[in-house]
Image (tube, rainbow, N blue to C red):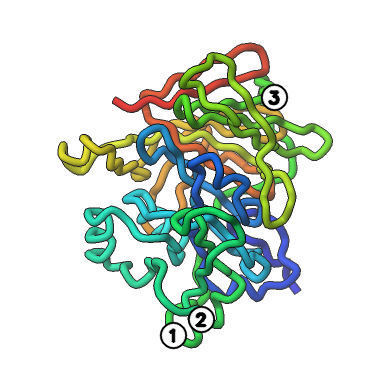
Amino acid sequence: MATLYNPLTGLSVDDPAFLQRRPLAIKIGNSPDYVRPQSGLSLADVVYEYYIEWGDTRFVGIFYSNVSIAERVGPVRSGRYFDEHLVRMYHAYLMFKGADPRELDYFHSLDIAPFFITVGFGNCPPYFMGPYKREGYNNVFFNAAKWEACTTKKGWDNSPQTLSGGFFSEETPQSPTVVARIYNYFSAVNYSFWAYEPERQNYVRYQETKDLVNRKVEVYDILYDDFTREPVTADNVVVLFVPYIFTNQNQAQDEVYNPQLIDYGDAYVFRDGLAIPARWNRAAIDQPFILTHPDGSPIYLRPGRTFYELMGVTSRKFTEGTEWRFEFVTP
């Protein structure tokens, strides 16, 4: 019998049952600080982090192989224009907690509108209040393990999908550039870095614990997953340079960004403690983008979880020895 592989991680599959379902794209808050540690980030196959507004970022976890054990994911937060790209690329359902009326109206106008699942009443879809003593706005979670039964009950489309996840290889690539830390500075209230762990051959996420509004020294600690009690890690960290635009000037006034993950752009791939200059190319609207070297040859990711950091195209890069720093800038 031929070995089956998860197209999103490149890992071999022991139980192929999840391949018969759609992935889930779940919005996960990253601010205010007290929503950390979040739940479920360490169970996602792929994670995207992008700037939303007023210095804050948000995560979208793509859950595929671990849906059956992801019993608490969140806190689930609101949808953004950008999320459409992930629903299309991964043929996913989007789990989110409402949206700005302009964005919600846009979601409703799409041909994929049935795959946008917001918080409602009852236990299907399986949202629930979390165990934390805080206001309800930041205390809504999603039980992915109950989703399949919910789709059966509702008659929703949860059919197997054909996904192209990219190229994977255990073989360490050729690169002269060793990078041990990747800093991502989005704002004075949201900054982080990834530290390479040679023994585990992965990256550990460190998140800011104090803002820089009234101080100059950056302070970090390991970001944990409060559901699994494990550090948030990635086998690959990819920094993507993406245009952050506004649909119209009125939306610029309150920072309703619309990141354009279409066509192509520049990137850096970090794996095995190395940095690889890259290009991202989204050749098909209904498939994930591919990563290539500047000459067009494919870049192979390390099998496992990939974490994408979406920087604006005018963002700045600084290097000092084996430490690289990206600072978020938009035009």
- Distance, label 3 to label 1, CA atoms, is 48 Å
Q: Which of 281/229 is in front? A: 229
Position of the N terminus, as image quadrant, is bottom right
Q: Position of residue 45 (x, y in %)?
A: 61, 55
Residue 91 seen in render: no
Position of the C terminus, as image quadrant, is top left
Q: Position of residue 59 (x, y in %)?
A: 50, 47
Q: Amino acid at mark 1?
A: Lys
- Distance, label 2 to label 3, CA atoms, is 43 Å
Q: Position of residue 275 (x, y in %)?
A: 62, 27
- CB contact under 8 Å: marks 3 and 1: no
**Residue at which label 2 appears:** 150
Instruction: Please give the name of the residue rendered at 48% of the width and 87% of the height, measured from the top-left corner.
Output: 153
Other-residue count near label 2 (Cα within 10 Å), few / some / many at <14 / 14–19 / ≥20: some
Other-residue count near label 1 (Cα within 10 Å), few / some / many at <14 / 14–19 / ≥20: few
Mark 1, secondary structure of its residue:
helix
Mark 3, secondary structure of its residue:
loop
Instruction: Please give the name of the residue rendered at 58% of the width and 60% of the height, measured from the top-left corner.
Output: 73
Q: Measured along the vertical axis of the image, is residue 298 above or below residue 20? A: above
- CB contact under 8 Å: marks 2 and 1: yes
Q: Nearer the viewer, mark 3 or mark 1?
A: 1
**Residue at which label 3 appears:** 180
Other-residue count near label 3 (Cα within 10 Å), few / some / many at <14 / 14–19 / ≥20: many
Q: Amino acid at mark 2?
A: Cys
**Residue at which label 1 appears:** 154
Q: Amino acid at mark 3?
A: Ala
Q: Position of residue 29 (x, y in %)?
A: 49, 49
Residue 19 seen in render: yes
